[in-house]
Amino acid sequence: MPEHFRMIDNARRTLTAIENSAVDEMLAGRIGRRDFLRHGSVLGLSLPFLGSLVAAAGFGTQPARAEGKPGGTVRAGVATPGGAIDPVTYYDSGSYQLVFQTAEFLCITQPDLTLKPVLAESWSPNEDGSVWTFKLRKGVKFHNGEDFKADDVVATFDRLADPNGASNALSVFKGLLSKGGTRKVDDHTVAFHLDAPNGSFPYSVSIDNYNAVILPASYKGDYEKTFEGTGPFRMETYTPKVGATFIRNPDYWSEKALPDRLEFKFYGDVQPRILALQAGEVDILDAVPLDVSQVVLNSPDITVLRVASTAHRQLHMRCDTGPFTDKRVRQALALCIDRSKLVDGLCRGMAATGNDSPFAPAFPATDKSVPQRVQDIAKAKQLLEAAGLASGFDITLTTLRYSDIPGYAQLFQNFAKEIGARIALNIEDQDKYYGKAVFGQSDWLDSPLGITDYAHRSVPNVFLKSPLVSDGPWNAAHFKSPAYDGMVTSYLKALDVGAQRAAASDIQKLLLDETPVIFSYFPDLLVPVRKNVSGLPPIAAGLLLDRVSLN
């Protein structure tokens, strides 16, 4: 037996049936290197072990990244936090970019969507994925000197899963993890007893769920006073509406941060941020919208990191309100769109084409054999005629003033004219559009036709559940389909790649038929940095600055 086959065979004897199914998928050529690493990491297998299997199978290895030089102050320009910073409740980029420097997650996603252990050393599911057990890292201390233990993890997730609290993470944990479901096994082991089996649960406790930073069990609020955490930086100063500074944590449990200091400057709008970068007042920005990207793309002093993302704009049609009670009308609007013009024109080629489901091309389970929906004006007109709307109809599209969305709305308005749909635009400020974010008190959730921004996720679980299941809290389409709900349940509980792909394919086909929401494109994330900056990991979740250096 050749040595590489012997290595794989010996390794397989240590794996569970579910883990071996992933190896089978790789060896059969049904998934590639990236998808194998990603799926194996979700199951809790270490990346070095997975890398050895990949190399033995002849897929090669990733080149090592050069380490930067230590020292200096890295300056970042970010959006002004939306209010008092509290990891339990925050939802805005300006807040979590700061917290990511001082507090940590059990694990984080990497550019290839694999999971890297951080405060957890390893994890594994039980046979059906209803219980996930995490081994915690020893020798870690919070900035206040307290030891990091299982009690802190239990308290953190009980806060986030409390239905009577104001946790922003309830959008992730509703129906997945209840208060009391996180249980201490010993000081360095916790078991998550889920409400239902889930095959990708570790992403829910990773940076993908930006509220899930681990706080001390004693946390009572007032986070801005201390920015308490276990992270590579400690708070030096924080001034609301102005900025913050952080210094290297000399007692950090892992490699010490390269920068001596971080300096964050807050900006109320994106234009002043870009001017500050161009003038050399800051070194890094958080992501910039597509509609202003050309300014920085053409600058000789700036590099723009393009990160493939699953972020998107959901164009919903209320299935309980005329004329959208008839799916032929919904299909007609989807068919009137020229997606190539959106990707190549509106997004300047920096986007992936959508096919009217949350399954972006970046997701491993996406069935790419499902035919891509393309513009077909003749068929769209036929569908409207069959629905009794040969002369078209009038409707108002309500959306928010954010990034490329107003441009998308105007292009959609023009596309719809070609089939006789007369669309008036109502473009609102974000606060008015979202309202209280509950049915009956939100233009987002109550409008018959609207476009909403959805941020990147490394797995499609939130996209599949909250906006599309029958009782979803973000179901702006008011879409109710027991068949769809059952398919989502099947997808979420699947532990092996084959079962996930089969369920994903069923979901994609059903949503193409029903079309409650149009997914036209998935724009790349664009992060501008000055040319002398290196070491920023190209991940869509946010800025991690501990390995950044200034050359």
Image: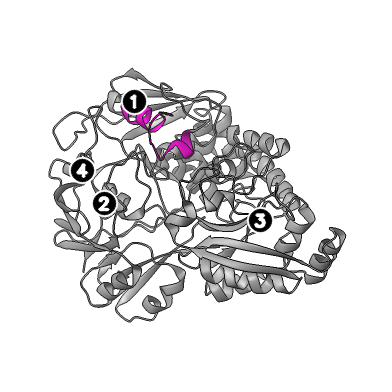
In depth, the one of 524 and 139 nearer the eye is 524
Between marks 2 and 3, how big is the CA–CA gap? 34 Å
Residue at 21% x, 69% y: name it: 551
- Of the numbered discs 1 and 2, the one sitting upstream in the chain is 2
Which secondary structure lies at badge 1?
A: helix
- From the viewer's perspective, is residue 423 above or below residue 455? below
Amino acid at dot 1: Val
The answer to which of marks 2 and 3 sits earlier in the sequence is 2
Q: Nearest the camera: 485 or 101?
A: 485
Q: Which residues are magenta?
A: 153-173
Callout 1 touching callout 2 (CB < 8 Å): no
Residue placed under numbered mark 2 in the picture: 98
Please give the residue where the numbered disc 4 appears in the rendered image.
227
Crowding near the residue tagged with mark 2, few <14, some 14–19, many ≥20 C-alpha atoms within 10 Å: many
- Location of residue 268 by image quarter: bottom left
Question: Residue placed at 15% from the left, 62% from the top?
Answer: 73
For the point 53% across and 53% down, the residue is 443
Label 1 belongs to which residue? 154
Which residue bears the numbered disc 3?
Answer: 356
> Helix, strand or loop at disc 2?
helix
Rendered location of residue 437, percent (x, y): 48, 46
Amino acid type of disc 2?
A: Leu
Q: Is residue 157 magenta?
A: yes
The residues tagged by marks 4 and 2 sit, at their Cα atoms, a distance apart of 9 Å
302 shown above or below 101: below
What amino acid does circle 3 point to?
Asp
Q: Are marks 3 and 4 in contact (CB under 8 Å)?
A: no
Residue 328, numbered label: none
